[in-house]
Amino acid sequence: MTSAHPDFGHIAGQSMNDTVLLQLMRANPPEPVKTLNGELIEIDQARGTCRFRFEIVPAFCHSDGRICQGGFLTGMVDTAMANAAIVKGNLAVAVPTLELKISFFEAMGPGIVFAEGRVMRWGGSVGFLDGDLKDEKGRLIVHATSTIKIVRPKKA
């Protein structure tokens, strides 16, 4: 296996540009991304960034379908942050979360949101990420930070 991440063991290790990597990741979205009605829209390996579009549906909401439950919003921004790290590691690393902090700034009901994840610091075994979730007007809904363990492939 050339990747420590189980979803990418069959393809990691190849040098891919952002266009090829984006096409590959879009073609095989993991189940949580599908469940959250997500679509990967942009990546940048060099900068360690990743953007998703998500559709919040009434089934994600409480208060008569008007306010999205925080766990769904957390999943969306966490997905963007984790994928930013996976892209930074060229699909060769797994990135389990060690710590996650979420700040909710605004309520959000059904509609479209955009999540951006960013690698802030990339170390030997630990990485630091941050991310935002914004509505279509650019209003900040959620800000998050995360500490991850960088699990690299084992050498043969």
Image: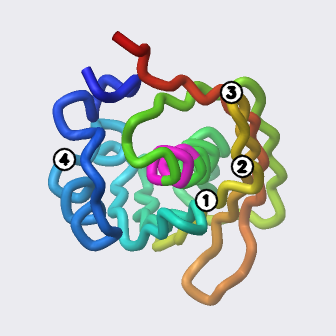
Q: Check disc 3 and give the amino acid type.
A: Ser
Secondary structure under tag 1 reads strand
Residue plotted at (63% across, 57% down): 67
Secondary structure under tag 2 reads strand
Determine which of the numbered discs, if any, sits on residue 129 in the image: 2
Determine which of the numbered discs, if any, sits on residue 28 in the image: 4
Q: Are marks 1 and 3 in contact (CB under 8 Å)?
A: no
x and y, in percent, of residue 3 in the image: 34, 28
Find the distance from the CA under tag 1 to the CA under tag 3.
19 Å
Looking at marks 1 and 4 on the same chain, the residue that comes earlier in the sequence is marked by 4
Find the distance from the CA under tag 4 to the CA under tag 3.
27 Å
Along the horizontal axis of the image, is 117 left or right of 25?
A: right
Residue plotted at (40% across, 23% down): 4
Q: Check disc 4 and give the amino acid type.
A: Asn
Q: Are marks 2 and 1 in contact (CB under 8 Å)?
A: yes
Looking at marks 4 and 3 on the same chain, the residue that comes earlier in the sequence is marked by 4
Q: Can you identify the residue that label 3 sits on? A: 125
Q: Check disc 2 and give the amino acid type.
A: Leu
Secondary structure under tag 4 reads loop
x and y, in percent, of residue 102 in the image: 79, 45
- In the depicted view, which residue is nearer to us: 78 or 111? 78
x and y, in percent, of residue 148 in the image: 68, 32
Q: Are marks 2 and 3 in contact (CB under 8 Å)?
A: no
Find the distance from the CA under tag 2 to the CA under tag 1.
7 Å
